Amino acid sequence: MTITTRSTPTPRPAVFPPPSTPLLFADGDRYEWPETGAAWTRVDGGWRPTPDDGSGYLTDVEVRSFLHRAVVHWDVRHRFVPVAPGEILPGAALHGRLDLGHLPVGDFQSFAQYVTSSRTGDLVPLRDLIAEYDEDIAYDFSRTIKFGDTAHLLGVMLTEQIRPELSYDAAAGRLYARYEKFEDGRRDAGMPPVKCLHVFVLSGAPAEA
């Protein structure tokens, strides 16, 4: 298979490998090799080179295997980028802590938390975002969090943030949280709140390798 490269590879070297192996995938997800600019996008259940030159395709099994090895061997040359949701969050809307308590997810199942990078605009693992500001502190953050802790965090978002929206997409194995908040000085300056997005991706083994 010919490796297809993007025109503008990511200039900053990766610090961390993928935080975990996603248990499920969704169309629009990307699998990337940041050092070379090679990238594949999931379309109709398969992975196509981006841009698609027809040179070859990957399957979910292959991508999961590549990511699994990257997690186990601390290989920073691989990256998984979950697709960002549209205006309406995918899956079933969650309206309160009671909804969170009834999700068919075991308390000890792990999720990898992705947030929006201030540098690229992509969804990145939380510790990668922290590393953009302080790499040393980022090492103290765990790769994944258990569902019980995730549910607690989402419950706090529901009660403490502005215009919170939550949903659970069982087909993709993802929890979504979107809300607004005022960063330091924005309210006093008469500026609008900042929109925040969290995507929790259900993790397969090895979640804590």
Image (cartoon, rainbow, N blue to C red):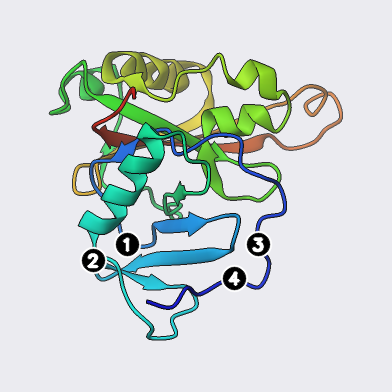
Task: Compute the Cα span from label 4 to label 3.
Answer: 6 Å
Task: Compute the Cα span from label 2 to label 4.
Answer: 22 Å
- Vertical position of residue 183 compared to residue 119: above or below: above
Mark closest to the chain's N terminus, 3 or 1: 3
Residue 135 % position (x, y): 68, 24
- Vertical position of residue 133 compared to residue 59: above or below: above
Q: Which residue is mark 4?
A: 6
Q: Which residue is mark 3?
A: 9
Residue 167 % position (x, y): 31, 38
Circle 2/circle 1 CB separation < 8 Å: yes
Q: Which residue is mark 1?
A: 27
Disc 3 versus disc 1: nearer the observer: 3
Task: Compute the Cα span from label 1 to label 4.
Answer: 19 Å
Mark closest to the chain's N terminus, 1 or 4: 4
Disc 2 versus disc 4: nearer the observer: 4
Task: Compute the Cα span from label 2 to label 3.
Answer: 25 Å
Mark closest to the chain's N terminus, 2 or 4: 4
Q: The disc labelled 2 sits on which kind of residue?
A: Gly
- Residue 21 in view of the camera: yes
Q: The disc labelled 1 sits on which kind of residue?
A: Asp
Circle 1/circle 4 CB separation < 8 Å: no
Q: Which residue is mark 2?
A: 45
Which residue is at a point 28% across and 35% down the rendered structure image?
202
